Amino acid sequence: MERIDYRFKKAWIFILLPLLLVPAILTAGCAGSTSDTDSAPEGVFKVAMQPIVQTDPAFIASDSEVLVANHVYDYLVDIDPNNIIIPRLAQEWTVSDDGLTYTFTLAEGVTFHDGSPFSAQDVVWTYNRLRDPDLGLPTQDLYSNITEVQVTDDLEVTFTLENPNPFFLYDLSDNHALMLKAGTEDASTNFNGTGSFKVTQYLAEDRIIMEANPEYFIDGQPKLAGLEVIFFNDEAAAVDALRGGQVDLALRMSTELFISLQNAPNIVTTNIPTNGFDLVRLRSDRAPGDDPRVIQALKLATDREAILQLVQQGYGAVGRDSPIGPLYTAYYSEETAMPERDVEAARQLLSDAGYPEGLKMDLHVPDSGGRPNLAVVLKEQWVDAGIDVNVVVEPESVYYGDDGWLEVDLGITGWGSRPYPQFYPDVMLRCDAIWNESHFCDQEFDSLASLAGSTLDEAERVEAYREMQRILIERGPVIVPYFFAQYAAINDGFQGFELKAFAGRTDFRQLSPGQ
Amino acid sequence: MLDDHNIKLDKENAAPLGGQRFLLVLRKLYSRPASALGTSIFIIFIFLAVFGPLVTPYTATEQISNAALQSPSADHWFGTDNLGRDVFSRVIVGAREILLLAGLGTLLSVIFGTSLGLLSGYRGGWFDETLMRFFDSLLALPAMLLALLLLGTLGPSTNSILIVLVVVYTPIVARVTRSVVLDVKNKAYVEAARLQGESTSRIIFGEILPPVLPTLAVESALRFSYAIFLVAALGFLGIGVQPPNPNWGLMVKETRNFVSQSPWALYSPVIAISITIIGVNLMADGLKQLLESGDR
């Protein structure tokens, strides 16, 4: 097949060459780009990532799960590396003046992998599933503000909101909001998306093999013939596989591994700032965390600058115990001063709280990234203040499994970078937040979070975020020691790679072989 | 055979008891270069484990500010690791940790293994059959797999590792002991003791145990070196002792990502593990040769 095709092409070019010669010389650049978009997909790209557990888009959480789903399915709207909303399945949209009605026009000629056409019906079904209170999916809270999703034309969908939401387009592009076919019964096994790649084989805990979707609705994409996500439990092993050429890309690695890849042959490294952070949190709804003096003592015993140097090798930024990092230039505030490290004051607070002999606790930490190191540094810093923690390092599957991370008193959780800050209070800090791991419940904070998430007045929102940061510094049961950088290292035989702050949303549709 | 060996020892030393007998074994170990080296290494590490932590310049967990990833120097003989901890101090304190844990685990396995082996070999019958088939089933599993299973169930802690060592090594010690017992229990002097009406425990511990002891010494030394290896390997896999414990295996795990920046922090515990295991193995080899030459 290939040979015939090749010979045909060759003959064709031979006959037309004299005719094309003059215009070709005049428009040398164009000829190149034309042949680029016409060229068949080529090359198989192999990505090393953590094993995936969830395959139903409604339940995906880890970078690797999102990465796989992002290639099998499509979002309605997407977010570019500069955090700007761009079209994907929705080509264009209009917003009513009161900010309550959003109307989207969908792309034409989109088909699912099983050949059936994609229509407004599928969008409505997908969002109704994600927000259905009876199903209780993780996105239910996020979409509780939607009153109705309607098919207004074959390729037109209208969302009606209860309250204005300035971040609604970002919410529509939530990691889980991948378009399924209406009526899909088992979304975790059938992989029937509209996405750029089709799943040909899924070997649990080993790899997932995908081939280019020739019917993909964007012309010339994907440029690769195949995509394989190979599962590695161990970051160092993934990096070794990259060095050895068994994989082409390693994402989401520790800083020390990233440093070790500098100057490695045939490997290009890249890093971008993110709002991702490690959250040290104390359960505040039961002893000992229900006494605000205990969390104050932990905060006073922590030296964040030293942690950034030791754990992140100085990459990233120092945290201020709030998930609103310096990346959100409009909302980040340094107005409330961080208290200086003071172990004596911490000791006194513990004593006042009824722990004159100090405090003994288990510190649960997943075995990924710099988290075990963070735990060890905290142990050493806190012991000065009489807080003796026993570090318990667990595989991520154990730490997050059975929702254990929501139960433990003292834990360290990694949070990925999001395009806008409202996600964090909504999902982990409000009284009724689904992943409220610190079990924090503060009425003032909640009303500020509601205001920030609904007002269309930007100045009001800035003020609300500033106040929320003050509350978290003063009494939030959370310590954010640093924000990390996102790292990737890729085989230099590929081009068109663009890393995103949430590594899982990095997509390979534009990636192609070539230097 | 083995009683002949005792007689021979008797000839060489009028009173081969207690300390004197120990010195005799030591002298014999030092008569061969390989076993002399192994024994020296072993003694040095025991010495370091006992007295080392008293003289280390830093504690094993102290994070010296602004001193991460330093090269070896007068202040830090083996340099510092990524969190600014003195690697020399960690290796020395780690020697105590690992020798204590592996030693205790070996001791318990030897005690349990010997008791069960003696009982099983001497009594025979259904007791022997049941116990040995049970041990066979444990031995059928690779030691590491068994360790992973147990630690997965028990959760990682020092006590769990002790349990792992006992469960993994007791069957091996018991089998070795039993094999010697089977050989010894039909000897004339055991028969004579039985006819004299001596109690079972007197026969087991008074008549059968002594000839088993030399084999047991070799086996214990071997088990000890495997135990060091297992404790370090579990530490490396991150399911053994938890950070910031200066377990050598855990140190390798923690510092291996920094190998391009601070190789000394990685190689120090690696070399410590290798030297200790080689030392103990050479010593065990010496003991074995000593035993065999005694037989001849």
Image (spheres, coloured by chain):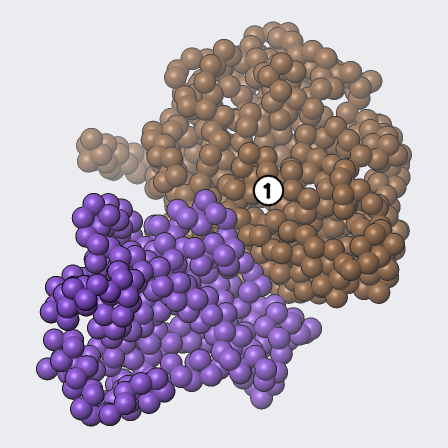
Chain colours: A brown, B purple
Q: Is residue A313 left or right of residue A22?
A: right
- Can you give x and y, in whole percent of width and height, for residue A303 in the image? 75, 62
- Residue ID at (45%, 24%): A188
Q: Quadrant of the C terminus of chain B?
A: bottom left
- State the residue position of label 1: A502
Question: In this rendering, is residue B222 above or below B157?
Answer: below
Disc 1 residue crowd, few under 14, some 14–19, many 20+, Cα 10 Å = many
Q: Can residue A312 be seen here?
A: no
Which quadrant of the view contains residue A436?
Answer: top right
Which quadrant of the view contains residue B112?
Answer: bottom left
The foreground one among A152 and A341 is A341
The foreground one among B59 and A78 is B59
- Residue ID at (41%, 43%): A231
- Can you give x and y, in whole percent of width and height, for residue B244 in the image? 58, 63
Q: Quadrant of the N terminus of chain B?
A: bottom left
Amino acid tagged 1: Phe
The foreground one among B83 and A392 is A392
Q: Is residue A442 left or right of residue B150?
A: right
Q: In this view, which residue lies farthest toward the front?
A: B196
Label 1 sits on a secondary structure element that is loop
Q: Is residue B127 left or right of residue A207?
A: left
- Residue ID at (76%, 43%): A287
Question: In this rendering, is residue B85 above or below A123?
Answer: below
Q: Can residue A454 be seen here?
A: yes
The foreground one among A83 and B283 is B283
- Chain letter of mark 1 equals A
- Can you give x and y, in whole percent of width and height, for residue A390 in the image? 62, 56
